[in-house]
Image (spheres, rainbow, N blue to C red):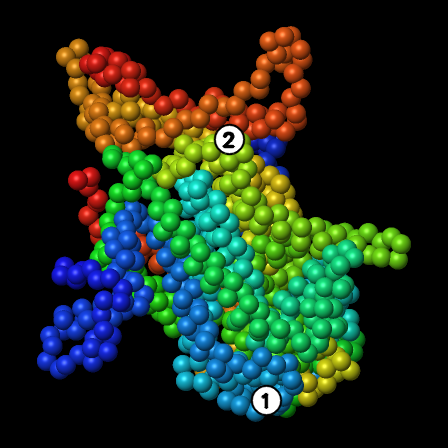
Amino acid sequence: MKKLSARRRHPLAALVVLLFALATTGGLYAAFAPAGNAQADSSQSLQIEQGKKLFAVGCSSCHALSGEGTKDGPTLVGVGSASVDFQVGTGRMPAQQPGAQIPAKKVIYTQDEINELAAYVASLGAGPSIPTSDQYAAGDVAKGGELFRTNCAQCHNFAGSGGALSEGKYAPSLDGVSAKHLYEAMLTGPQNMPSFPNSTLSTQNKQDIIAYVQHTTDPAKNPSFGGLTLGALGPVTEGLFGWIFALGALIGIAIWIAARTPKAKKS
Amino acid sequence: MTTHAEPTAVGDHDDHQVGHSEAGVDQAHLGEKAADWVDGRLGIYGLAKANLRKIFPDHWSFMLGEICLYSFIIIILTGVYLTLFFTPSMGEVVYHGSYTPLNGIRMSEAYKSTLDISFDVRGGLLIRQIHHWAAIVFVAAMLVHMMRVFFTGAFRKPREINWLFGFLLLFLGMFDGFMGYSLPDDLLSGTGIRFMEGAILSMPIVGTYIAMFLYGGQFPGNDIIPRFYTIHVLLIPGIMLGLLVAHLILVFYHKHTQFAGPGRTEKNVIGMPLMPVYMAKAGGFFFLVFGVIAMVSAIASVNPIWAYGPYRPDQVSTDAQPDWYMGFSEGLIRIMPGWEIRAFGHTLVLGVFIPLMIFGLVMIVIAAYPFLEGWITGDKREHHILDRPRNAPMRTAFGVAWIAEYGILLVAGGNDLFATHFNLSINTITWACRILFFVGPVIAFTITKRWCIGLQRRDRDKVLHGRETGTIKRLPHGEFIEVHEQLSPEALHTITAHEQFQPMELPAEVDENGVKRKVSLLTKTRARLSQSYFGEAAQIPKPTPEEHAEITSGHGHH
């Protein structure tokens, strides 16, 4: 005890106490928090109520208790359920840390919980709602390709491989993104992406784009006809590959051939 | 090599008789007759006698030029095949072909025929990929070949003209490549052609006219693909073939350079004869080059035009970069701030025009260097013995600085991919490249120069004190020494064979009559450059035989 009191004015004491308090509350929370197996309920109001509870725990630290937003997170009034379904359903939300862009990661909520959160956020103000499965049914690949190259390729690249934006932001790869999430992304314009409401891209257009993306990123439907795609990133990776593997091999062979000759001797 | 081929004078033979040799003659006899027949018309015996035993020195780096030659041949062979199926036309068609994801899409005939080559022509995609990969290797090999020539000083008299031929081949190769990948009229190539239009338009006064003449009107027009086609398959390859032949003739005429070594002088070439050693080696190497390029083409996709889609001026994809050899121009554009001057109703787009000028500068420096160095040294003698890069620190440092600049610009040209793949901000990369554009070459120059001088010092050490053997000896009084072993006379010769120039001195300020001498600025510059090339700071005096004798006679007490 004497040791402890002797050090209580140490410059790092406050930090130690803070860390201790954080660890304790965190540990207690982990021990006593209810398991995330909330039962789905068809009742709208019950869903909203459940969603509110989940929101208070997982989202309110940045988006504030009733979703009006803080300096760390935008207001969610009027973003609609489609936005929640996309952000939480792709693991982007809840965010791990602030940054240029919140990356997709492991999804921590079940679809039922996501629906509850979405229902709660939708109740805050009207916005685009989660599309039904017939809305994001795949359309025409060729038409979608044309639309994709006009509207999407300048950031996401011709093959949906993704690309860089300013200041560390980026357009992510579209490989493996579900049709529903593609539709929602176009509808709501998450993070740095512009939104493409139905007045810009009709539902039919969106379906065509979904068809194109799903066709292009699926190796079963769209095998790489020429061999390794080298990331489908255009000539930069091709040049790198050519220098290292083609010219590298040829220089190696040149060295090998030159080494196969007995050294010339002065006669 | 036949040993019994008797020299015959032209016209000695009745060709009727030789042309219809009777059955039952043995092979050698037949071959001899055929050779005689040809000699009677082309004089091949004389040519063979003069050239078949021509000696070439042996070093792996002397084969880099061969990679260029062979990949060029591969490009021509595969290119001929592609012309059979390619339609150089910007006429619009609606696609209904094998590649269903583009069904019903409007595109140019050029793009459609490239799709057909890729999906319907037998072996078409492989040939296309061999053509493209070979082009990538061709230009890369030319650059590496030029580096070898540069760093060993092989461009010195009498080979300056051949250096220029090589430079032109590099320059033309770059542009022929650019035009080649512009032909399919896919989204990426169209973006490149648009880029070029922008660069042309940025030229004051003449820019708009050149663009209108070249494109036959407003971009994109209907002419650019057919015109590029003619230039790509006929004009530039024709010039390149001519330059290539001239390049090789000059290699024969000048004889190949060689590294210093025992018995090697400026007057001889020590190595192996063309026939049979280099015939076999070069022939075999051709097939190896073809094999490697074909293998790479079978393994890795290049320019997947079907994935890019047809070109439309209102569409663009990210990762819109040129092939690597044009990458430094992309880098110049990407790091250049978008400056503009508007005056008198005209706009001067410095943001594009300055990069265009630097693009020219980066290339011209290559062509000009031999003449610059020749002017500094004032050396009018012929050089057939190669320099070791360390013994020409300024030249080596200059070359490395150029490579550093080139590399920085390549990184700048791919800044978006560096951003996404290393989780960096593209703005940070761009700013780093802007700073490095000015600082990088200086750092590279300084490090290389010091490195070279360090190596020269090491050479001097090795000559005077021998090679470290790694054997530790304990002397009776307890001291440990490492045993040094004197170099062999051959090795001594090799590392001391280079000559060291004396830097040029400015004449005394006043002449013998006490009159102040007028020294032109040019002379002063030359003297200053000469000092930096050959002054005390640039070369470690190589040991004289006396020094060597003195120190080696000291029985190790040094």
| Residue A216: x %, y % from top left | 54, 79
> Is the C-beta separation of discs 2 and 1 under 8 Å?
no
Q: Residue at left 25%, top 32%?
A: B491
Q: Nearer the viewer, residue B328 or B58?
A: B58
Q: Regarding mark 2 in the picture, which secondary structure is present there?
A: loop
| Residue B493: x %, y % from top left | 27, 29
Can residue B428 be seen here? The reply is no
Q: Amino acid at mark 1?
A: Tyr
Give the number of the disc on residue B378.
2
In the image, residue B72 sits, relative to residue B451, either above or below, namely below
| Residue B395: x %, y % from top left | 48, 36
Q: Nearer the viewer, residue B113 or A23?
A: B113
Q: Residue at left 44%, top 59%?
A: B244
| Residue lying farthest to the right in this orientation | B344
Task: Pinpoint the chain carrying mark 2.
Answer: B
| Residue A65: x %, y % from top left | 73, 64
Mark 2 or 1 closer to N-term? 1
Task: Pinpoint the chain carrying mark 1.
Answer: B
Q: Is residue B302 left or right of residue B271?
A: right
In the image, residue B350 sits, relative to residue A200, either above or below, namely above
Q: Nearer the viewer, residue B417 or B181?
A: B181
Q: Regarding mark 1 in the picture, which secondary structure is present there?
A: loop
- On the image, which quarter does residue A49 sit in? bottom right
Q: Amino acid at mark 2?
A: Gly
Few, some or many C-alpha atoms within 10 Å of disc 1 (few <14, some 14-19, many ≥20)? Answer: some
Q: Nearer the viewer, residue A180 or B500?
A: B500
Few, some or many C-alpha atoms within 10 Å of disc 2 (few <14, some 14-19, many ≥20)? Answer: few
Can you identify the residue that label 1 sits on? B95
